[in-house]
Amino acid sequence: MTKTGLFSLLYPLVLSALVLNCHCLERKLHVVYLGWEISLKKDYQLLPSIMECCIECLEAKLTAEEAARISEMEGVVSVNPSRKHKLHTTRSWDFLNLTTDKLGAAPESDVVIGLLDTGVWPEHPSFNDSGFTSPPTKWKGACTGANFTCNNKIIGARFYHSGDDYYEGEVPSPRDTEGHGTHTASNAAGVEVDARYFGVAAGKARGGVPNSRIAVYKVCWMDGCGDADILKAFDDAIADGVDVISVSLGAGWPLDYFDDCIAIGSFHAMKNGILTSNSAGNSGPFPVSVSNYSPWSLTVAASTIDRKLVARVQLGNGQIFTGININTFELNGTTYPLIWGGDAANYTVGANPEIGGWCLTGAMNADIVSGKIVYCDTIWDGSGVLLANGVGNIMSDVNVENLDVAFSWPLPTALVSPSEGKSVLEYIRSTENPIATIFFTDAWKDAMAPDVVSFSSRWPSPISPDILKPDITAPGVDILAGWSPLSPSSIYYGDTRSTLFNIISGTSMSCPHASGAAAHPKWSPAAIKSALMTTAYVMDPSKSEDLEFAYGSGQINPAAAVDPGLVFDASEADYVNFLCKQGYNSSTLRLVTGDNSTCNGIIPGRAWDLNYPSFSLYVEDNQPIAATFTRKVTNVGAANSTYVAATFMEMLFNSRRMSKNPRFTLQEHN
């Protein structure tokens, strides 16, 4: 069946969804994925000849019966309810040893990084185009939307909105009103600027490839990121001519590869010689929590840098407690009366001391709270104390023992451990007039870095546990980067302070670090990924009990990745073989690949022969622990190089016999 024929069959269903109001059959928005369409040959200056892709999908409000009927039609890959994906929310580049003297020269300006996110703030100083020439000749993109102007740094901007309405403050434009997209874009490719967050972490901020270009594809809004919008953005980014696609968002629940719009889009990108860098998700430290686990994309976990942001609180009895926290307000050592939120419970609205102790919004009596610092029994957004005219917060939560990421608040705030919180409450109870003060945030040296942060999602993949995911880790904790001045400046959405820079954490922040490090358009996506993984800094296993299941191959080492020596390359055919072994059939594959790919002769089985840069032996219950892995390496170093393969133990005992700088090792872990 042709796509024209499919459109003719779908049209009556779409029309009926618009004009009928049937209470017995609930209609929901669905995405109909039509697969791959071959159209024009285009020269992306990446490969001698490349086929342009079109990721075709339709949107229609369908009943469950209609969706099931359409899914059986010839030419349809999948029909799914339209899902909303979530965003996964500087010294970091210097910490990675990619100092300014190691940055690439002029050729970087031909590299285009495409970001699927919340858009960008185009006037931000991180995107100043001084010194930039016209966009590279390969660029085919466009700058669309009102109230948005591109320059020679931001060379493309598009927006996609399949929803019905815009929330207050949102604009039909690539302009960023959330802040997330500006942060990720400047993190990957922002030019060097003086930056600080209300005086905290002052210094130089820049992206990994500041001389590269940026293309913005706004797919995320206040209600999330829609499937159809993501697919359309992938399609445009590929056709426009980007070199790397950075996607700091994910579904948050397990999806089959061809039900996952990000896996579909990144497969099309791979087919066109473009690597997709994905965030691993923020659902750690639980197992089977990793997102974006397709083997043809790069999956990035989040780790710490050697800067820890802390704030101190001092009680009237001289006790001082320090917690991981960002306090941007200066009290200058002035002390204020200290109370427990439960002693200010707002009985008028039905609150009691327990609820008041949580300091929830409206749960405290403003007459009692006004002018005081309030101790709270949980970690909240600060609005309860702020709106009750309190001076500051001291927060503690019995369920949060060691917070390893800093948050900022709309008023002076300090976070303390549960045991320290108990001491604060004991002081309040034992003193007639308890007082306290909160100090401005300090930046401490973190000698334990890098360490995988607790929220970073973990292996195994829920679909293919034979593929070790995440692939790699990168800085994603307390990262200072650009921000939209229209977005709240702290975790309280009602915070009206405006800032051009913010400090936030997430695999959303680690992903653009890897995207910047992956800006190497001369290599295949698999070769780029391999280079990043095999040259990664070895992580200290004593710091993370989940080991490679948390950090993959280690922390990215961008300076070393440009010269990996050997790479594990893989082509579309290798991924097709992988999918066949995962149980996909030839007809489904051809809809996606657009060619004559076949699973004939391929027996379903394990993924041990995929030419992947890591090994994963997933052992099922009552099965023997045995596997054979086959790998093929390609030399991208000097023609006369000599390489020595060794297991981890052989490296330890035979290090003198190995080459001075071995590029390739097989690591073996018990």
Image (cartoon, rainbow, N blue to C red):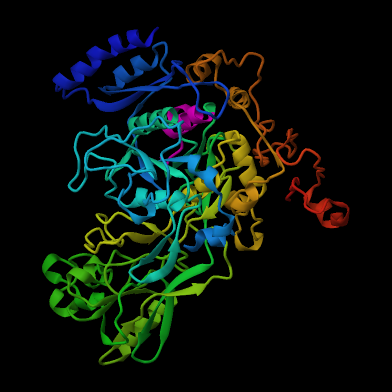
Q: Of 643 and 221, which appears nearest the observer?
A: 643
Q: Main secondary structure of the magenta part?
A: helix
Q: Can you say which quadrant of the picture contains the N terminus?
A: top left
Q: Which x, y percent locates residue 603?
A: 66, 20
Q: Which x, y percent locates residue 583?
A: 57, 23
Q: Residue furthest right?
A: 657
Tell me if 387 is positioned left or right of 392 in this view: left
**What residue do we see at 13% from left, 78% from top?**
367
**Number of numbered discs present?**
0
Is any atom of residue 295 visible in this view?
yes
Snapshot quadrant of residue 641: top right
Q: Which x, y percent locates residue 19?
A: 14, 19
Snapshot quadrant of residue 610: top right
**What residue do we see at 66% from left, 49% from top?**
535
Vertical arrangement, residue 659 with respect to residue 218, above or below: below
Query: In the image, is residue 259 part of the stretch drawn in magenta?
Result: yes
Vertical arrangement, residue 344 with respect to residue 134, above or below: below
**What residue do we see at 38% from left, 17% from top?**
71
Snapshot quadrant of residue 408: bottom left
Vertical arrangement, residue 329 with respect to residue 611, above or below: below
**What residue do we see at 17% from left, 72% from top?**
388
Q: Which x, y percent locates residue 233?
A: 37, 32
Q: Of 239 and 440, which appears nearest the observer?
A: 239
Is any atom of residue 256 visible in this view?
no
Question: Where does the magenta region start and end?
Answer: 251-270
Q: Residue furthest left?
A: 348
Q: Of 492 and 443, which appears nearest the observer?
A: 443
